[in-house]
Image: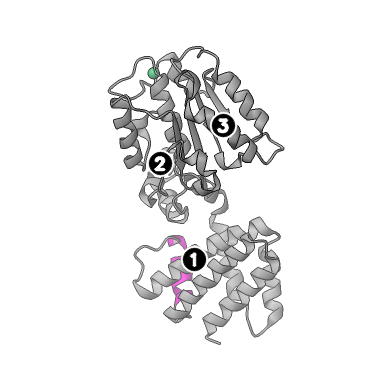
Amino acid sequence: MQLGTVKGQERIVNALTRSLAANRVAHAYLFEGPEGCGRRTTALALIQVLFCTQPVNGDACGSCPSCRKLATGNHPDLQLLSPLPDKRDISIEQIRELQQVLSLRPYEATRKACLIEPADRMNEKSANALLKTLEEPPGHAIIILLTTQADLLLATIRSRCQHLRFSPLQDQVIEELMQLNGFEPALAAELAPLAEGSMERALTLESEGDESKRRELLACLAQADARQISTIFDAAESLSSGREETLILCTLLISLVRDLLLLRTVGQSGVTNRFLAAELSAEAVRFSPENIMAALELVLNTRRVVQGNANPKLALEHLLLGYDRLRKGI
Ligand SMILES: [Zn+2]
């Protein structure tokens, strides 16, 4: 990955490119931003420029042995540090090991590099152990910390790093990246607006977002009748069996209700679930525009409470009941 090919984070890439050109790359960075917005890709691209033996116009060449080793994930001078598989935190022992490795001469590159991810999983002990290394990394090593939330890190850690804030990706960038990943243009266009700025989310949506699940969801909504409570229980029963599934349903439902709102207010343009246009148009006219807004809030709220450990089945029943009440205006 070359810096020049990182998508959607131009402001940050430009800042890094300027630092590289001026030979003023910081020895410690904190990359903050949502999951799937390119923090890791950018960090690896920066390290690649620093390791590249034949840089071209200030960017990595992409073909020297060093670039090739980074691309396959086995460059001996790059350390990746994350919590061990069965542990929550990055331990102080891991930090000490890292310090030991960084203190050795680089094998092939001119300096060593280390990526700590997620950096907010360092507990107080391990974070404190890292402090001095952050201030003066041995042998000009570069240390990059990745986090979704910088305020979870000790202030003393933050103050020793150059803090760069990544934004969620624009829908258009996600669409482009999905196409580069082999998605059909139509599917990429449909899923990109649902990804909330995260490529990671876009890729999971692909597996969740199949047409049949959305059709089934619409059918269950049609069947759920607030005046006959058993239909609510039946619809909830057939839709979901657990928390993860309920969260996926909420995401799909958000996209469907957003389409209802568009259809009820501005018409077809911007509708995401175009393959359901006929069904959605029929559904949209059953609502007043205000009640569609209320339905959207209801689904957003349901997703929040399920994320926050509410019983998923109860939450879904409550959602179906509320949805039909809003639809009927009762
Ligand atoms: Zn190279």
- Quarter of the picture holding the N terminus: top left
Callout 2 amino acid: Leu
- The residue indicated by pointer 1 is 256
Q: Residue at x 61, y 72 (%)?
A: 319
- Mark 1 neighbour density, 10 Å: few (under 14) some (14–19) many (20 or more): many
Q: Circle 3 is placed at which residue position?
A: 130
Residue 281 as seen in the image, left or right of residue 126: left
Tag 3: amino acid:
Leu
Q: CA distance from mark 3 to mark 2?
A: 19 Å
Label 2: element kind: strand
Residue at the location (62% across, 77% down)?
A: 321
The residue located at (47%, 56%) in the rendering is 194
In this figure, what is the number of numbered marks? 3
Q: Which residue is mark 2?
A: 164
Residue drawn at 59 percent across, 67 percent down: 302
Distance between the alpha carbons at the discs numbered 1 and 2: 35 Å
- Measured from the top left, where is residue 14 in percent x and y? 30, 36
Q: Which residues are magenta?
A: 274-284
Q: How far across and how far down the image is residue 3, in percent?
A: 36, 31
